[in-house]
Amino acid sequence: MPAAVFRQDEEPRLRELLDAMERPVELVVALGPEETPLPGAGDFDFSAETVKIVEALAALSGRVTSRVEQQPEWVPRFPAVLVLPAGEDVGLRYYGTPYGYELASLVGAVLEAGRPTPSLAPESLERLAAVDRDLAIDIFVTPT
Amino acid sequence: MLLAYKAALASPRVSAAAIEAGEFPRLADEMNVWAVPSIAVNGVPQWDGAVRERLFLERVLAPSFG
């Protein structure tokens, strides 16, 4: 992973987008014992990298804040990033280190959380508003 | 991934988590993850691959869940 989290040429646009968010977003990095990753991870410090990425994102705009929590009991695996729109936990999680292609997922989650209404089609919003049972969506991803 | 996050933001009954398969290989193995993105709902593996909004919601909101 390069030293800088964001490319210099993409920072201005990102700052602009984050500054324009209608509600603030808080990022909580939850750290604790990690599972042994697949071979090839080498000396990569997943927890330290996750903190670095989240802090770099928060440093871009006053609309994003971040904090680190050690082993919160309500988080099943570490590291994790919780995305809280206006400080409220609505169930947005990233388990692991959001680097590579997955950095865009974290940025996208923050930008969506900063909107008063998610950018979905009106009929999608209607269908989701009518959901009357708990649905936990897990999406397995890789950063490369 | 973003569609799942949007769905969670649109409904208090929906939550969404991205899970980095390489960092959590045991869980990925239990969930039979072979390709990414791999989607599970309420702990049950569903499908692999990105789909458009309409199909994503059709599958996630299928009556068999919950």
Image (cartoon, coloured by chain):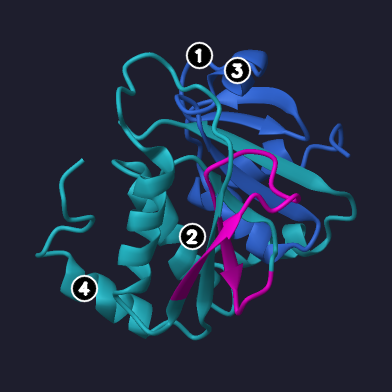
Q: CA distance from mark 3 to mark 2?
A: 26 Å
Instruction: Please name the residue that numbered disc 4 is placed on.
Output: A13
In the foreground, A31 or B62: A31
- Circle 2/circle 4 CB separation < 8 Å: no
Q: Chain of mark 3?
A: B
The C terminus of chain A: image quadrant: top left
Badge 3 or badge 1: first in the primary sequence:
3
Q: Nearer the viewer, mark 3 or mark 4?
A: 3
Q: Chain of mark 4?
A: A
Instruction: Please name the residue that numbered disc 3 is placed on.
Output: B26
Q: CA distance from mark 2 to mark 4?
A: 16 Å
Asked if badges 3 and 1 are on one and the same chain, I answer yes
Residue B57 can be seen, yes or no? yes
In the foreground, B16 or B65: B16
Asked if badges 1 and 2 are on one and the same chain, I answer no
Q: Nearer the viewer, mark 3 or mark 2?
A: 3
Q: Which residues are magenta?
A: A65-88
Mark 4 belongs to which amino acid?
Arg
- Circle 1/circle 2 CB separation < 8 Å: no
Q: For numbered disc 2, what is the local secondary structure? A: helix
Q: Which chain is cyan?
A: A
Instruction: Please name the residue that numbered disc 1 is placed on.
Output: B34
A56 drawn magenta = no
- Crowd class of label 3 (few under 14; some 14 to 19; many from 20; radius 10 Å): some
- Crowd class of label 2 (few under 14; some 14 to 19; many from 20; radius 10 Å): many
Instruction: Please name the residue that numbered disc 2 is placed on.
Output: A109
Image point (38%, 48%), residue name: A48
Measuring from the top left, give residue A102's x and y in whole percent.
37, 44
